[in-house]
Image (cartoon, rainbow, N blue to C red):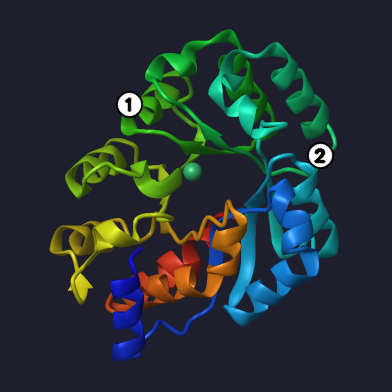
Amino acid sequence: MTTTTKTMAEQVGELYRGAVFDTHIHFLRDAWDEIGTRSVFEKLDANGIERALVSSIPDDGTLMLHEVDPRRIVPFYMPYRTLADMDDWYEDDDILALMEERLDRGIHVGIGEFHLYDASNVFTPQFRRLLDLADERGLFLHSHSGSAEINAIYRLKPDAKLIWAHAGLVEPAWQVAETMERHPQLLADLSFRESSILSGRGLDPEWRALLIRFADRFLLGSDPYTVPRWRAFKDILDVNRYWLAQMPVEAADAIARGNAQRVF
Ligand SMILES: [Zn+2]
């Protein structure tokens, strides 16, 4: 997202007005004091966000929000105690043990967002166990990774209930299309893809075609993983509402809310 885009959104003034199901929210420890649970819900209200998929470091942040409104907050288990765990979590027995213990509470409906840096990360005994746990309990997975890791997960679990965070983050439209085509059950959230989707004042033609083609499998997400991103929450949502307003209305409704509502 760029300031130019935001200015344009304001100039044009045309923003998608429908309700949103935000599928990429975090409530990390530093936001507990600096933003706070009450303000999180105020921001959801102010931005027309009906429901939200939430995960946090540590997991208590997610449970705090879930406790306030269990109908509105869809809790995912993020497998990190601190940010330092992100580096090698997929081969750490302690992290796996803690995950099992937390999942045993029966609150979470998914595991993630988690980060995979290489397809080989998927084949560790610990990650295989995670996949079994998700399978046994019918949990979703929310994977921040490239398409190679998505392919690897499906190799082990063809029926995985998988959400691809940021639709690959840096992968071009053709590669996202190829991956969506290969795995008909794959869902993908579009957080952090605003600068790919928008080109100047309009939609990038390749992305527009991609979003329309898979309009029943893309999800909206804001990803407030830092305090500054929580403070910029309205701007992030407005940029998304700006590009959604340029989509056919049925596709916009599905991506903004309908697909997530159907799945959760
Ligand atoms: Zn991410």
Give the image location of residue 257, x and y in percent: 50, 68
Task: Look at the numbered disc 2 and give the secondary structure of its residue.
Answer: loop
Residue 163 in the image: above or below residue 24? above
Residue 166 in the image: above or below residue 200? above
Whether residue 245 is visible here, answered yes or no, is no
Residue 255 in the image: above or below residue 152? below
Q: Is residue 205 left or right of residue 146?
A: left
Location of the N terminus by quadrant is: bottom left
In which image quadrant can residue 4 be found? bottom left
Q: Which residue is mark 2?
A: 106
Q: Amino acid at mark 1?
A: Ala
Ligand 1 lies under 8 Å from the Cβ of mark 2: no
Whichever of labels 1 and 2 marks the residue nearer the N terminus, that label is 2
Q: Which residue, as the protein is rendered here, is positioned at the far left?
A: 205
**Residue at the location (77% across, 63% down)?**
36
Give the image location of residue 234, x and y in percent: 53, 75
Give the image location of residue 219, x and y in percent: 45, 58
Q: Amino acid at mark 2?
A: Gly
Location of the C terminus by quadrant is: bottom right
**Residue at the location (29% across, 89% down)?**
12
Whether residue 187 is visible here, answered yes or no, is yes
Q: Is residue 215 left or right of residue 81?
A: left
**Residue at the location (32% across, 32% down)?**
147
Dot 1 alpha-carbon crowd within 10 angstroms: few under 14, some 14 to 19, many 20 or more:
some
Residue 40 in the image: above or below residue 201? above
Q: Is residue 26 left or right of residue 23?
A: right
How many callouts does the rendering have?
A: 2
Q: Which residue is mark 1?
A: 148
Task: Look at the numbered disc 1 and give the secondary structure of its residue.
Answer: helix
Q: Is residue 70 left or right of residue 231?
A: right
